[in-house]
Image (spheres, helix red, strand yellow):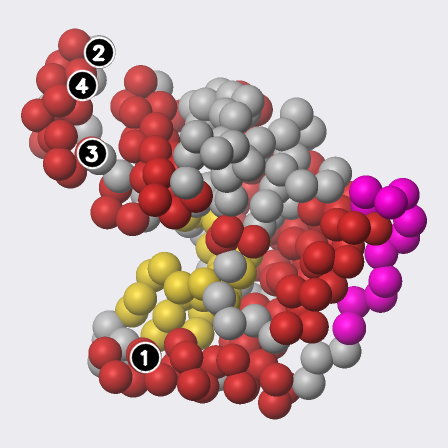
Amino acid sequence: MIIDCHGHFTTAPGAHTSWREDQLRAFLDGRPAAPYPRIGDDEIRDGIEENQLRLMDERGADLTIFSPRASAMAHHEGDLAVGTAWARACNDLIARVVALYPDRFAGVCQLPQTAGEPLDAAVTELRRCVEELGFVGLNLNPDPSGGRWTAPPLTDPYWFGLYETMCELDVPAMVHVSASCTPVFHATGAHYLNADTTAFMQLLQGDLFARFPQLRLVIPHGGGAVPYHWGRYRGLADMLGRPPLEESE
């Protein structure tokens, strides 16, 4: 079986995207957001069958591990309540895709994350998605500030409650930032790759897996700069007193 471990619903129905735009406008205006629209199964099929499913068939992929569009998570917009409603709507839409094509897609959830806020809402949504919707993983944003990098490193105790829940539920996280709100970092051309490299270096500097040996994290997009500067990171590992790879399992 060929599994694509990194797929996003980039062709979600227009009504879903329009609701998000209205939700953010409502937040800025200080008014309640409109109710989430009714989206039919055919609208979902139209977005999937002519895009992701067609490409999977053309390229020989059997299954895609599927999550909401990463750049649209936009954790830096709105507040925690807005982000929680948005994450829930996105995850429910992914669950509908999986229900329509259970042999071709497995769900991965978006978390409600807001810079400076605790992760209680993220833990609650993760539990809902795994225990009620049958999801197999989550996307974890190490920088919910959108390029300002105000969150603690991934090795900080701030994240430990989420890691404990991941280990309990036996699900991995893909470390994945979202949109950039600063012109310094182009989202997909710079911010994504910067984040992958940064996440690796944070993990190299800490002992996270000694504390959480069952924790599983996936760094996407080819690992950022790490594979292309392996000598640099191997040297840094030596300088930091990290054990050789063959001794670190």
Whether label 4 touches label 2, CB < 8 Å: yes
Residue 168 visible from this viewpoint: yes
Label annotation for residue 240: 2
Q: Is residue 188 left or right of residue 182?
A: left
Is residue 106 shown above or below 103? above
Is residue 26 shown above or below 16? above
- Identity, as a three-letter code, of the amino acid under mark 1: Leu
Q: How far apart are marks 3 and 2 (CA)?
A: 16 Å
Q: What element carries label 1?
A: helix
Q: In which quarter of the image is residue 37?
A: bottom right
Q: Mark 4 points at which residue?
A: 237
Q: What element carries label 4?
A: helix
Q: Name the residue under label 1.
A: 55
Is residue 12 shown above or below 153? below
Q: In this view, does 235 lie to the left or right of 147?
A: left
Q: Residues in magenta?
A: 27-37
Q: Nearer the viewer, residue 220 or 162?
A: 220
Crowd band around label 2 with a 10 angstrom C-alpha radius: few (<14), some (14–19), many (20+): few
Q: Mark 1 vs mark 4: give the one in front.
A: 1
Label annotation for residue 226: 3
Image spot of residue 82 (x, y percent):
75, 47
